[in-house]
Image: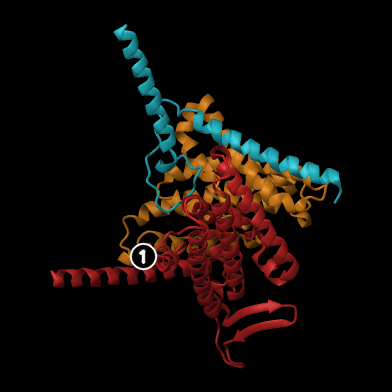
Amino acid sequence: MDTSSIIIMTLVVFGLVGFYAIGLYFNKKTPLPEECELPSLKCEHCTSVTCSYSEKNRVSIIKKDIKESLKNNKSREGALNE
Amino acid sequence: MNKKQNFLKGIFTENPVFILLLGLCPVLGVTSTLFGALGMGVAFTSVLLLSNIIISLIKNLIPNEIRIPSYIVVIATLVTIVQLVMQGYLPELYDQLGIFIPLIVVNCIILGRAEAFASKNNVIDSTIDALGMGAGYTIAIALLAFFRELLGSGTLTIFIYGDINIKFNLIPDGASFEPITILVAAPGAFITLGLLLGVINAIKMKREEKNKSKATANS
Amino acid sequence: MSIANLIVLVIQGMLIQNVILTLFLGICPFMGVSKKSQSAIGMGLAVIFVMVLSSTITFAINDLILEPRELGYLQTIVFILVISGVVQFVEMFVKKTAPYIYKMLGIYLPLITTNCAILGLALIIVKPELEYGYAEMLAYTIGTALGFTLVIYIFSTIRERLENANVPKAFKGAPIALITAGIMSIIFIGFAGLV
């Protein structure tokens, strides 16, 4: 195996890992469209970790939303007090 | 949970095939002979064992953002190693399992165990967990293959390698007995698994009833 | 490659080598998402879309990068990463641009990553002994995806009726569904002499 093959191999694998990681990150950040709620399923059997169908994988997003709304409320309260 | 319970849960209470109904594709696909089922069980167990060990060792080194992609790369690499080793040293088994070896990657059990167990526990517990789950999986598919091959072709194939061919023919020569050929064909996989699951459900229900009546008698 | 040959490949992928009933791929969604016919159609459409897209991409990567460099042993790693990434991007894209479609199909997209039918097909079409070109690959992929949708839809309509059937208690749910699938598989054996 020559060097160029090894370089291409590494590039392809790392590139694809990056591709998938970016996809996962942005997909989690994109909010669900309005009026569209995922059916809340507490899937016990399937253990897929990337599936946004299952409730346990959505916890982080929900937490973030709560934090953000808390922040907004606080800044609003601050504005009112002033 | 002690170590013995941790091992046994993979075989009984959390059996990946019979109780959780996970990873059914290879369960149906490779069980036309006992040899294929045992080979698949060994391949599956070795990938699960190695991935659990590696992931429990590197769990603190991986940043959270690329955790799942890295797990997938680890698992896919292990699967490729198993595939190449099998192609080189056990070509008969490799031909029989075919596409189901690379498909171990998408088997929900492996990524699920990596995420749910190995990323939170130490190496020893993860090893025991993998061995238990692997044993439960192997027992389940071997049981299915046992019934399918025995009733479907009247033989039990244990091992094939080059000239070595350990195969029991259970139909005596000259006997006028026709095996149920449909069981080794594609439909037989579905039907046999359905019947096995039904029998296991029936046993489970009987046990629960017994426990209930015991509990009421005690109180 | 004539049109007739391509049609033969579509029929072969759809009926003769049906991805669920004869190749045993994609059993998880077949058992999991077939309780209602509406969700079965949703899953089927999502699978058609993702399967055609990801198979084309993996086939092109194999053809342009892996084969000329003799890196065939990377197929498993590369294909699973491509499929997982494509599913994530498709989900994000549909969420942003077409909320209506997302409402109908979106919830099935995440389930597809662990669907072995997609990776299985990607690995089947690059087998060197088949010698598929791009046109044949596309025809066979479309046939397979249609076959998946057809079978999961038929199965879901049967399961809707099974709900009300008088089944022994121990066989309710998965066991009787598997036996039903076995009977469907017997029917599909009949297509074997079609081409």
Residue at image location 30% in from the left, 65% down from the top = C169
**x, y percent for residue B217:** 14, 72
Residue at image location 57% in from the left, 87% down from the top = B170
Judging from the image, mark 1 belongs to the subunit labelled C
Residue type of the residue flagged with mark 1: Phe
In the displayed structure, A51 sits above or below B75; it is above
> Chain B in the picture: what colour?
red
Residue at image location 53% in from the left, 74% down from the top = B148
Q: Is residue B124 visible?
A: yes
Query: Residue most toward the right?
Result: A2
In the displayed structure, C26 sits above or below B33; it is above
Q: Which chain is cyan?
A: A
Q: Which chain is orange?
A: C
- Quadrant location of the N terminus of chain C in the rendered image: top right
Q: Left or right: B3 with respect to B217?
A: right
SS for dot 1: helix
Q: Left or right: B212 with respect to A64?
A: left
